[in-house]
Amino acid sequence: MNFSLGSYLKRLRSIIIGILIISILPALLFGTNTQVEQNVWEYSIKNLKYPLFPDVFEKYQYSMTIFFAALFTGLAVALILTFLTTLLPRFLQRVTYGLLTFLESLPDLFIVVVLQFTVIYIYQSTGVLVANISNVYNNPIYLLPILTLSILPAIQLFKIALLLMKDEQHKPYVTVGRAMGLSRFYITIVHVFRNILTSLVQYYKTIFVFMLSNLFIVEYVFNLNGIMNVLLNTKGVAFMVTALMIAIPFSLLFEIAESNTIKLNKQEEEEAA
Amino acid sequence: MIIKLLKQPQAIIGFLFITGLLVFSFYWPSLLDVDKTESLKLQDFLYDDEGRIIDAPPYSPSQVPPLGSDMFGKHIFYQAIDGAKYTILIALGIALFRILFSVGITLLNPRSSFSFLNDIVQATLYLPTAILAYILMNSLIMKQSMEPMSTIKLIMLQCLILIGVGVPPLISTFSREIRAILNKDYITNTFALGSKKVYVYHKHVLPELSTKLVLLFAQQVVQTLILMAHLGVLAIFIGGSAIVVLGDIFSPMPVAIPLAGEWAGIIGMNFAKIKAAPWAILTPLTFFALLIFALNLIIQGIQNCLETHKS
């Protein structure tokens, strides 16, 4: 574990200044009278006003549950699929890669809507409700949002892992392992996978930022009472507080990951030198 | 670079698809041999051969081929084809201006690190771009409802917001790139030999950036398209919207209709009726997906070019 409080505080300061600028920007550009007059600690959805505290903690917890569950599902699916593809013949591996490029370009909105319809269609034709497709009052849904949110990161991680795998398989230690009579299966699981995981961590930023943006669309389309829905409907100070609630823990995560990957890279350089 | 790009079949396919769609979108009435106003009119009811009313909108794809109609009885297929040109041109324009603005701002003072912009970039990492654009657009619409402005001005302001949302991250990318180029030895030599800044930027910095610029431009087009789709779902339409009252007298139902016919508008307009007319929202979304796929093919081609260039 490698973490310096000083550089984190520096990053935090710039995040707070940035969010402050963003939250006063609408009033600055279009005049203060465009901001609907409402109590500072309130947010409004469809002209109904709700108090921000203490509701927001519950919503926050709900959103984060979905977010991390989706992240881990996506990661697990990606790793399993990567492993299975390495067992395929080379020609099928190329087909998989091409297919991934296509799947990657599907917009998140498309996937959300299509999944929703698939569930409805299955319900209509067989009478089996696989999962609830929309949030009903006080009855949060988990399965479908997690599934939807995990698809795109899974595809991205799968693609990255496949590329890394390709690089890794030509490294000397794999050849040595083969020469020692270890099976391809064993080398992939024990040695190659461990190395891929450490390289995969370096892509955390792209994945996290991408997933936060997806989380918003998922929450909006499934009508979930999550943190992003609150963020969308708040203004001014309340917006700032909600945004900081998202930014502070994630920036802490980024800081830890960043300082550790830098350390990792340095180690590799030293080894190479 | 263009010659190299021509050797990438995927880039050519992507490019041909987009140009084809654009041309088709401009000339579809003559190509499909249909009357434009006739095929885009509102159809209140569907009649059978004897003139009896058999159905009210939305019509399914089997009733109104090829792709059904929306809540007002307009053909979704023709709408999507007609909207392609607006969507593509708006996205291209916004991406172009994002690149131009950010390069321009960076070149004003390439040595500075733009600390306050850096703060904004740090903050926007955690906020989805759609939310950022939404809070700005919403304020703009508020302002418009209080003091009416012309449609042209509204569209300009909306485009400026869409451009502005993407500029800070680009500036931080460019300032990093340009600083790396300016630190190269031959640039220092050129300055030592007494050349002017403008000359160096024009002759050395921009040519070296050019491939990177094309790549970033294509990526920005994709991002703009996704942002437009998200804003469409949030019922923010480029070009403003008109409110039409549907439903009967006891339950009036105001519905916002986008004035420009771009895809995001079609999605947003039909989003509330998603369960009644799934084809009305899946069609524009599929078009979005295809367009983004074509752009990704081009991006892949450019990246392949860059890799062969290096080796």
Image: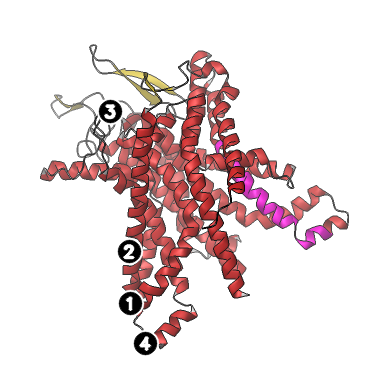
Residue on which disc 3 sits:
B71
B119 horizontally vs A178: left or right: right
Q: Give the colour scheme of this rendering.
A: secondary structure
Give the percent coordinates (x, y) of residue B306.
58, 63
What residue is at 62 percent from the left and 49 percent from the top?
B173
**Mark 2 against mark 3, which lies toward the viewer?**
2
Q: Quadrant of the C terminus of chain A?
A: bottom right
Q: Quadrant of residue A272?
A: bottom right
**Mark 4 against mark 2, which lies toward the viewer?**
4
Give the percent coordinates (x, y) of residue A103.
37, 55
Instruction: Give the secondary structure at mark 2.
Output: helix
Mark 1: amino acid: Phe
Mark 2: amino acid: Leu
Residue on which disc 2 sits:
A81
A97 horizontally vs B180: left or right: left
Residue B98 shows in this picture: no
**Mark 2 against mark 1, which lies toward the viewer?**
1
Residue A119 shows in this picture: yes
Residue A181 badge: 4
Instruction: Give the secondary structure at mark 3.
Output: loop
Q: Are marks 1 and 3 on the same chain?
A: no
Q: Are marks 2 and 1 on the same chain?
A: yes
Residue on which disc 1 sits:
A185
Q: Within 10 Å of the Cα at label 1, are there few (<14), some (14-19), or many (20+) other Cα atoms?
A: few
Q: Look at the image and give the residue range highlighted in magenta.
A: B165-189
| CB-based contact (under 8 Å), mark 3 and mark 4 | no
Mark 4: amino acid: Gly
Mark 2 or 1 closer to N-term?
A: 2
